[in-house]
Amino acid sequence: MKVAVASGKRKMAIARASVTEGKGRIKINSKPIEFHEPALAKAKMMEPLIIAGDAAQKMDIEVNVSGGGVMGQADASRTAIAKAIVNFTGDEDLKKKYIAYDRSLLVSDPRRKLPKKPLGRGARKKRQKSYR
């Protein structure tokens, strides 16, 4: 039995996807994707499946995602799903389609939050200075 595994990252979220031959079932953290909320996050995670077309109907995808917020997890999941589908099928044309549509489908976002600095409330904001 053929299995393909891939991971995706976005902000603090990390997703791991495994693809096996099956009937087109997609589960995010052991729950079917149909019940995933909010709808915008679900739509984002469905993008690589829609682009793959009929190929996605012949595989089962299991995604485990942790950390970060709702949209960070959605972006990490979509990257992991797309990478796993490309690894499973070995289709170069599909890889080119993904890159033409959105490069972040196959490349994890490297941006991270800046650390807080002294004399301020965050990474950039400083306390107001007054001379009188």
Image (cartoon, rainbow, N blue to C red):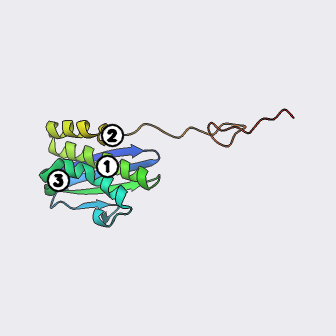
Whether residue 69 is visible to the viewer of this picture, yes or no, is: yes
Q: Which mark is residue 78?
A: 1
Label 1 residue SS: helix
Q: Quadrant of residue 105?
A: top left
Give whichever of discs 3 and 1 has the lower sequence position.
Answer: 3
Secondary structure, mark 2, is helix
Figure quadrant of residue 36: bottom left
Callout 2 environment at 10 Å: few (<14), some (14 to 19), or many (20+)?
some
> Residue most toward the right?
132
Decide: few, some or many residues near mark 1? Use Cα within 10 Å; few <14, some 14-19, many ≥20. Answer: many
- Relative image position of residue 95 (x, y in whole percent): 20, 38
Q: Residue at x 29, y 51 (%)?
A: 17
Task: Identify the secondary structure beneath mark 3.
Answer: helix
Dots 1 and 2: beta carbons under 8 Å? no
CA separation, marks 1 and 2? 9 Å
**Label disc, if present, on residue 56 of the rendered structure:** 3
Q: Are marks 2 and 3 in contact (CB under 8 Å)?
A: no
